[in-house]
Amino acid sequence: MNNIRFAWRNLQKDRFYSLLNVGGLALAIAASLLIIHYARFEYSYENVHEKAEHIYRVTLDLYRGGEYVTTDAETYPAAAPELKLRIPEIVDYARMENLKMNEVSDGENKAFLIDKIFAADPAVFSIFNFQFIQGNKQTVLRGATDAVITETIAEKFFGNRNVLGQTLKIRGHIVTIRGVIRDVPENTHLKINVLLPFSFIEKFGHKVDSWTGNNNYLYLQLSPGVDLTAFNQKLRKFSEEKLKNEVFTAEPIKKIHLYSHKEFEPEINGDARTVNFLLVIASLILLTGSINYVNLTTARSVERSKEGAIRKVLGSSRLSLIQQFLAESLLINILSFVLALIIIKIAAPIYLNLVDKPSNTSIFSDAGFWIMSIGLFVFNCLLSGLYPAFVLSAVKPVSVTNRSFTNTPKGSWLRKALVVSQFSVAIIVLAAALIIYQQLVYLRSQQIGMDIKQTLVVRCAGGEWDSLSLRHRMAFKDELLGIPGIKKVAWAGSVPGLDKGFMNTNNAITRMGDEMHAGFNYYHYVIDADFIPVLGITMVAGRNFFPGSENKHDVIINEEAAHLLGFPSAAAAIGEKITLQSDNSKYHTIVGVMKNYRQRSWKEAQMPMIHSYDENPPYGYYLLKMDGGNIRADLTAVEKTWQSYFSGHPFDYYFMDEMYDRQYKADIRFGKIVSIFSAFTVFITCLGLLGLTAYNVSRRTKEIGIRKVLGASVAGIVQLLTKDFVKLILIAIIIATPLCWWSMNRWLDGFANRITIQWWIFAGIGILAILIAVLTVSFQSMKAALTDPVKSLRTE
């Protein structure tokens, strides 16, 4: 207890250093804990499922000949039953098909657009852990019209009452609610709102026993102890018997969120590289804060060594001195942790929003957070306290009393190494933030081959195929053109910027009489004759669709598709015939080739696109090109027109350029996180440099006084005290540059289109680091240079 009391007195005696110590450590601890909490959440995906260790997802590797092309997260529905019969290691399976967003109504006065609607096998409830509030998981999804909904959907339609037996209407089909489950936790890749029987896919035009449409996710529960490599060999053998240019592969579901980035994932997954990069930053920030404590403590080593020497003369043992200095470290860490928790409490809502995690998440109610905090506290106490304690307790009384106490070369080199380490870290994170920013600017500044500005997208209503609904849809489109601010209107089955899941994919498209160019992944959706003019897409050969039924067997492709199909030029493709696996018609005629446009962002490779024609089916989107004169009035007019034709159906709209830009959301978020924590790192590093400058000034006080007496100028003294630190920063630049270049090149390799890292980035960041260091050092050096030399000499 006495040690703590003496430690508290020492902190009060030198409040400036105490504030630097506590403030720097608190910022470092708060930043580190926030990052580590986020990383723990990312790595916790699928832990909500008790059988997660035994659950695997089957994906589909696509090949062209023997050359790998890509991997589809979806498989064929007919595969699951046969695999269960053929491979004994399979305990059970569940197929799940994402029916995307659909209009759901209660048949009376409530209708909402609901996404994450899945058709699934009943075994989904025995493989995964979905908590039932109402209903029996043993019996649900057995009937053809059964439905299981989440508590949020139940409350949206029916309030808090018992909803079993109630009905909903989904794309014109009546379903009966047989179960209600709790909302699915955030840390699973399967976010579900509604579950329907797997046979429900036939109402959407798909077959449960199809070997031609790979539209469903296949999950397997395997026996404990199964060797994944051997199991995948069995899947390969099965694939060779059933498929051509395609191979089934199983992957653990716990690897999906951070390591799987396949075509048609059910959601945008995280990235292990990003999480690990942030963990490295967290470690470096914490290390930087601890280094500050060491530097700020040793900066006062002359004064504290006298204290230790006097205590030794009075009979204190070295062990008691070590305990005293460790007590001081403990007290500073306690104060720092308390302040860090206050910072976390204040910053948590902003931080959770920044990392796109639920704002209702309580960090402090997480037991893992406290275990992690306690471990970090103990580690930091030892890391920041041991070196000063052992160094200062080892001072001999005679070396202080006869004024021969100096710092050993070993200690001097250690402090310099710590400064180099700190600035190396600061340079790396600053350069990383700049490179991330440049990459985003590059991607967002590229031409996308179409004009998406002032384009309003309205989702089609309902899902009915009857003639009255068709006439309403056609009349709605015609009436929109009567609104003064609407220049053009088109319809499309999908829209640029939407996830690939809103398109069909096909790797079995071939030219008539040419099997050489099979095996590539093509993307296909239907459009009308106004789609190309509305978006201003350029035709490089052939023509656009004609309005009307004569386009039934016609297709328009882009330049990339023409290239992959083996045509020497766009013009050579006109009039040629290709197959479409998803269509009953054997051949379709290419009537036009459009210039490549970016259906998806520049983060991804150019997609080979194929468009067929349809005038106005009951799904998809209207595209309204607006003049931008009075958007609010035009939007009101569009909604009024909507209500006159589709009263009772939700009016769902967005602007295409805003939705398109959301593809960069995760990268923008990552850039912001790195920028914020790089600022933290630089600030904490400056605190450490300030402490080391204070140490250097205190050590050379007499020298400074003598130089001033001999006529040295203030500028000369500042230069004297600054030049050594500039040398250290130059060393840090040399160390940081190759490390940052290597790590950021690895990050950039994750993009299909990327920048080349330029040398001037590191030169600019290096100059900035030197300026920051010079300003920090000059602040303390100026105080020493302006001190009366008489006072300086008296200190000795």
Image (cartoon, rainbow, N blue to C red):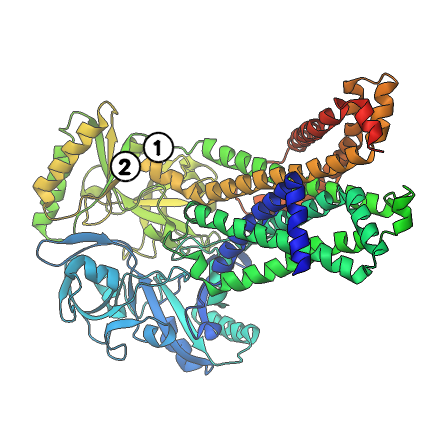
Image x and y of residue 180, in percent: 24, 69
**Left or right: where 386 falls relative to 150:** right
Q: CA distance from mark 1 to mark 2?
A: 9 Å
**Left or right: where 471 falls relative to 700:** left
**Left or right: where 770 falls relative to 153:** right
573 relative to 245, above or below: above
Residue occupying image coordinates x 54% and y 39%: 675
Q: Which is more toward the observer, 493 or 315?
A: 315
* Residue pointed to by mark 1: 537
Give residue 492's quadrant in the image.
top left
Residue occupying image coordinates x 78% and y 35%: 698
Image x and y of residue 422, in percent: 69, 42
**Circle 2: element type:** helix
**Circle 1: element type:** loop
Which amino acid type is marked by label 2?
Phe
Which amino acid type is marked by label 1?
Ile
Quarter of the image that includes the N terminus: bottom right
Disc 1 crowd, CA 10 A, few/some/many (<14, 14-19, 20+): some
Image x and y of residue 283, in percent: 62, 52
Residue occupying image coordinates x 30% and y 34%: 532
Q: Which is more toward the observer, 697 or 596?
A: 697
Quarter of the image that includes the C terminus: top right
* Residue pointed to by mark 2: 531
Image x and y of residue 704, in percent: 83, 26
Asked if marks 1 and 2 touch (Cβ < 8 Å), the reply is yes
Q: Which is more toward the observer, 728 or 369?
A: 369
Residue occupying image coordinates x 27% and y 57%: 584
Tag 2 or tag 1, which sits nearer the N-term? Answer: 2
